[in-house]
Amino acid sequence: MSNSTPTRTGLVLSVLLAVASAAATGNNQRGPVAKGKIVSQLGSSAIYVFQAKNHDYWFGSNDQGVYRYDGKIIVNFTTKDGLCSNRIRGIQEDKSGNLYFTTYEGISKFDGKSFTTLGISASSSRTNWKKQSDDLWFVGPPDAGIVFRYDGKLLHRLEFPKTKLGDEHFAKMPRSKFPNAIYNPYDVYCILKDSKGNLWFGTTCVGVCRYDGKSFDWLTDKILTEAPVRSIFEDRKGNYWFTYSGGASLDGFRMVNDFGKLQERAKGTIVEGMSILDDNNGKLWTAVLRMGAFKFNGKQKLPYPIKEGNTTIETFAIYKDNKGVLWLGTHNGGAYKFNGQTFEKFRP
């Protein structure tokens, strides 16, 4: 696994216990009214940035829960306020304005007042695959090889159909010989719902899966099975871009038009990509772990390194807010906002 992956050791047992408890009850577990704690600034870990429909900014950390910035004050919410874990792995919003925070220990829903831990359906995890327009999708915990579909009432725990690459992986690394392995080849790092409504899943080492509601198709080009697929992006022309991590020489690739062979862009265009998107002008940007951000203008990549003194800031995700402004979430420097020329540290 890439050394840029947030630490997973020690989580598996607690995850399994939490999942078993939620599945047994099938009920959403509501926490207390969330008051949070007013703070003067973000913590050093702010790996995810998200702006809600009401324009509030949310920042997800690796160890201190979430922060909300309403344009005036920053409030930090943690497990003390009902969040199911302080280790955030994603943020999204439904059409009603409820927020959802992915963690390896469950999914927390925030309705503006309280956090609710979503309950998990006890139905079959292999036969309950379906796709509905209002569903929300979440990555599963490590070493589980699953994703979650939320239908507005319950989470559905879904396992992928077995593949040749998956079977080969387990044959080479059987748990009888590797009992301490902390990942599954089907673990998902990213999910994209494309413009046609198809779901795309980037996995640890069995490629990229596309699910159209009826069938599963897999992209298993070697480049997508040698390292975790970190992000999937559909550009304005209908091209799909994939970034992955595992070595500083790895490049970004795109798939042109329909489901087919990957087309290499330009060697060295995007390196060790953690996430990718385009700006208001259609230029591609990617967050690169120890190298800040890069913009690709169609011919060359332009670097935007991030440093604080002698400290290299490790960027984790790039995000575009409601006005098209770019942000960077980092492991060790809080959040950064693009001012048109460079990324500045966010200081309210």
Image: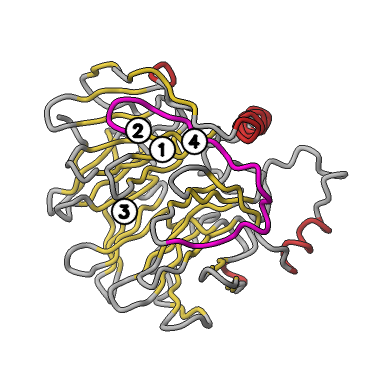
- First in sequence: mark 3 vs mark 1: 1
3D distance between C-alphas at marks 4 and 2: 10 Å
Query: Residue 46 or 303: which is nearer the viewer?
Result: 46
Asked which secondary structure carries label 2, the reply is: strand
Instruction: Say the numbered circle drawn on residue 293.
Output: 3
The residue identified by callout 4 is: 118
The residue identified by callout 2 is 110
Q: Is residue 27 left or right of residue 181?
A: left
Mark 1 belongs to which amino acid?
Answer: Phe
Q: Position of residue 141 (x, y in %)?
A: 59, 41
Q: Residue type at mark 4: give it.
A: Leu
Q: Which mark is residue 101?
A: 1
Labelled pair 1, 2 in contact (Cβ < 8 Å): yes
- Mark with earlier residue (1, 4): 1
Which residue is depicted at the point 48% across and 64% down?
199
What whole-number distance in Å separates the C-alpha atoms at marks 3 and 2? 31 Å
Which of the two labelled residues, at mark 3 and mark 2, occupies the earlier sequence position?
A: 2
User: Element at badge 1?
Assistant: strand
Q: Considering the numbered disc 4 on the image, is that residue within a helix, a strand or a loop?
A: loop
Indicate the secondary structure of the residue bearing disc 3. Answer: strand
